[in-house]
Image (spheres, rainbow, N blue to C red):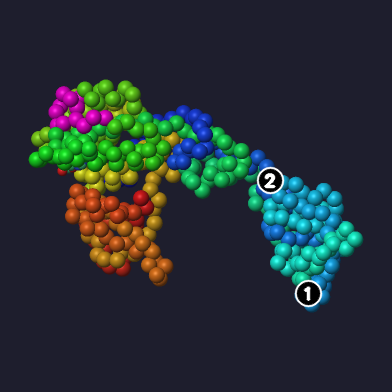
Amino acid sequence: MISVAEAVKIIKNESFSLAAETINSDESIGRVLAEEIRADMDLPPFNRSQMDGFAVRTKDVEEASEKNPVKLKIIGEAVAGKGFDRKIKKDEATRIMTGARVPDGADAVQKKELTRQLLSENGESFVEIFEAARFKQNIINQAEEIEKGAKIFDKGEIINTQMIAPLASFGYAKVKVFKKPRVAILATGSEIVAINKKPKKDQIRNSNSITLKILAEKYGAESKVLPIVGDDISNLKSQISETIENCDVLLISGGVSVGDYDFTKPVLRELGAKIFFEKVSLRPGKPTVFAKLNDKLIFGLPGNPVSVAVTFFLFVRAALLKMQAAKDCELKKGFAVAAKEIKGAKERDSYLPVRVETASDGKLVVESLRFSGSSNFIAFSRANALVFVPKGESYNQGSVVEIAFL
Ligand code: AMP
Ligand code: MG
């Protein structure tokens, strides 16, 4: 029985890389960058005012106070999108708006609330400044945020919603990403019916296909859900051999254990697939199968909904991200404190679904979920992490434990 780490290593080794393609940035969430993202301009592109107020020379307003305001002549205005192109000289100021270019000569912006505009005298307007201004006050210098040419994101980063504004700001209406792995999803089991059907006696609904579809798509894949196949060797065989032609990864749920009607492995062998492993030191998810047929990856996942989710997160996710050349293919790890005792298993490493929350003392705390075996997917629906318990171990309340965030 191999460890999870060994299994992940094998999967990553066997995952081939996909080509790149250019797509619209508004459809790029969850995709992996196939190019470096660089700033094509300075930001800000000019010395920018952060406030509505008056562009001034600090020297002129050094002595300004509420009692003795300094009076400056207003010689124009700098608006966002249309700056003021003359230089400000001694005892002069311009009105300035947030986002506008600061005129030459000015070295500070005093905010509007600390000024008072006076009525014009013979066609000239003046402003009173009630407080001295610091050098560069309320001004963000050109290139202070980022310099033209600087790298912002690396190849291999997964695009998330927070990355969209930088992409847009530097003109990436389109972005180069790795192609989507094409994932086919096959639920097996004679007791399984579609979710829009009322299960008859002895039947249950298919929750695995939709779960796998959503998870695969979340990690950049495109997916195709196949019709449910009963526990029937010949149907299973023809469905697999037909599907494998048109996908990169085939996910089969169910039928991987030692039951008399578990046909996934025998069928894979009959089709000539190379099986890399079929047993992992893992609870839940021990009978996970990883194979290859015609160079395509095949995962046989144990049918229990919790096993399906856990093995997806540990194994399938790594394969999908590796195929897209992602920098980080594995779940983000961390540490937290056990709120209650956490029991491991004797013969297998456990990766138990848990809920992690921050406590008022600032610690991350692991609340175990009712894990009454791998079928408790109702409890699993609250999970946001897996806690790792090595075989033969248990953790007392208060122990620091290793977790992986889902
Ligand atoms: P198996 O891996 O085929 O032995 O199935 C293990 C358990 O998971 C059984 O109780 C199955 O009924 C259940 N199961 C298998 N496939 C699905 C599915 N697609 N949706 C929900 N439960 C399933
Ligand atoms: Mg079954």
Residue found 27% across the figure and 37% down from its top: 209
Q: Is residue 80 left or right of residue 269?
A: right
**Residue 300 falls in which quadrant of the image?**
top left
What residue is pinned by disc 2? Answer: 42
Mark 2 surroundings within 10 Å by alpha-carbon count, few (fewer than 14), some (14 through 19), many (20 or more): some
Check disc 2 and report its element: helix, strand or loop: loop
Q: Nearer the viewer, residue 74 or 165?
A: 74
Q: Is residue 291 left or right of residue 77?
A: left
Would residue 22 be visible to someone looking at this image? Answer: yes
Up the image or down, 369 lies above or below 267; here it is below
The magenta-colored residue range is 226-237
Q: Quadrant of the N terminus?
A: top left
**Circle 2: residue type:** Asp
Mark 1 surroundings within 10 Å by alpha-carbon count, few (fewer than 14), some (14 through 19), many (20 or more): some
Up the image or down, 280 lies above or below 346; here it is above
What residue is pinned by disc 1? Answer: 65
**Residue 379 falls in which quadrant of the image?**
bottom left
Q: x%, y% of residue 365?
A: 34, 64
Q: Is mark 2 within 8 Å of ligand 1?
A: no
**Residue 305 falls in which quadrant of the image?**
top left
Q: Nearer the viewer, residue 128 or 234?
A: 128
Residue 342 highlighted magenta (yes or no): no
Task: Kindly check if marks 2 and 1 are in contact, taking CB atoms under 8 A apart as contact.
Answer: no
Up the image or down, 356 lies above or below 328; here it is below
Q: Is residue 154 left or right of residue 228?
A: right
Residue found 39% across the figure and 41% down from its top: 218
Residue found 22% across the figure and 28% down from its top: 268
**Circle 1: residue type:** Ser
Residue found 32% across the figure and 31% down from its top: 224
